[in-house]
Image: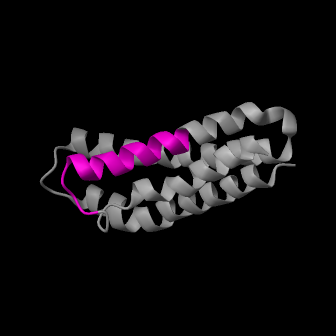
Amino acid sequence: MNIWFLAAGATSLAITLLHLFGGGPTIAAPLLAAKDLDDVAKFVNYYCWHVVSICLAVMAASFAWSGLAATAWETAVLGTAMAIAFCIWGIALVIIKHQRFSAMPQGWLFLPVAILGLVGFAV
């Protein structure tokens, strides 16, 4: 059992729940209610919101599996790589687009997951 991968999985699960229950009302619902967006753009973005939901759940499950089964370390590689990529892109997007981290903190959410995943490989 790898406690670090389990912690990364629990943190990923918390992010998944935050995405679903926080992002649903604040992001997905206003997106669907927008009258000034073309239906294709609206529903492709809504589809992408659900793809993110699936990716976050898969990341949490991959860490949980690696945490419980030492022979499943490859799934922690996947989860760690995803967390690092999401972290880098989330932080870079704010900088590139001159936004505020207080308005778009998503990238920072993945930093603890990435660190826990990397530590899990060191033990």
Residue 85 in magenta stretch: yes
Residue 19 in picture, x, y percent from top left: 48, 59
Q: How many marks?
A: 0
Residue 74 in picture, x, y percent from top left: 72, 31
Magenta region, main secondary structure: helix
Residue 103 in picture, x, y percent from top left: 29, 66
Q: How is the image coloured?
A: one colour
Q: Nearer the viewer, residue 3 or 21?
A: 3
Q: Is residue 47 left or right of residue 21?
A: left
Q: Residue at x 63, y 59 (%)?
A: 11
Residue 84 in picture, x, y percent from top left: 51, 42
Q: Does residue 25 lie above or below 97 as drawn?
A: below
Q: Does residue 77 lie above or below 113 as drawn?
A: above
Quarter of the view holding residue 22: bottom left
Q: Residue at x 73, y 41 (%)?
A: 121
Q: Is residue 6 left or right of residue 31?
A: right
Q: Does residue 45 lie above or below 75 as drawn?
A: below
Q: Is residue 94 left or right of residue 89?
A: left
In the image, the segment drawn in magenta is 82-100
Q: Residue at x 60, y 51 (%)?
A: 115
Q: Nearer the viewer, residue 108 or 103?
A: 108
Q: Nearer the viewer, residue 6 or 21?
A: 6
Q: Is residue 6 left or right of residue 105?
A: right
Taking the view exactly as shown, the residue that stands out farthest to the front is 122
